[in-house]
Image (cartoon, rainbow, N blue to C red):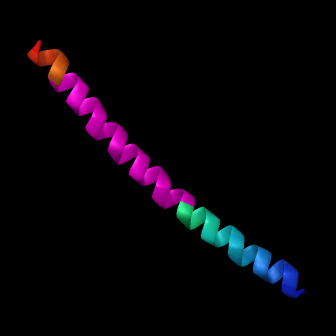
Amino acid sequence: MNLSYSSVGTTTKLRFVYKMMWELLQITTLRTNSKIVGTTTFY
């Protein structure tokens, strides 16, 4: 019982961390894309 409970807690933490990482990745991608688009438009 104890093992399955801690495993569930770990899964929840991993999902939370994954969501945070995914949002960070999307923000970074958006910034990079806007920079690339801005550079392409400039040239």
Q: Which residue is farthest top?
A: 43
Q: Above or below — where is 12 with respect to 40?
A: below
In the rendered image, residue 38, in percent from the top left (x then y), is placed at 16, 25
Q: Which residue is farthest right?
A: 1
Q: Which residue is farthest bottom?
A: 2
- Classify residue 13 as left or right of residue 32: right
Which residue is rendered at x = 24% and y = 25% of the image? 36
- Classify residue 6 as left or right of residue 15: right
Q: Is residue 30 shown in magenta? A: yes
Q: Above or below — where is 37 with respect to 23?
A: above
- Classify residue 6 as left or right of residue 20: right
Q: Quadrant of the C terminus?
A: top left
Q: Is residue 16 shown in magenta? A: no
In the rendered image, residue 12, in percent from the top left (x then y), is placed at 65, 71
Q: Which residues are magenta?
A: 18-38
Which residue is rendered at x = 19% and y = 16% of the image? 40
Q: Above or below — where is 25 with respect to 36?
A: below
How many numbered dots are placed on residues in this image? 0
Q: Above or below — where is 30 with respect to 4?
A: above
Q: Quadrant of the N terminus?
A: bottom right
- Classify residue 27 as left or right of residue 36: right
Which residue is rendered at x = 86% and y = 81% of the image? 3
Name the magenta segment's main secondary structure.
Answer: helix
In the rendered image, residue 29, in percent from the top left (x then y), is placed at 36, 38
Which residue is rendered at x = 9% and y = 17% of the image? 42
In the rendered image, residue 37, in percent from the top left (x then y), is placed at 22, 23
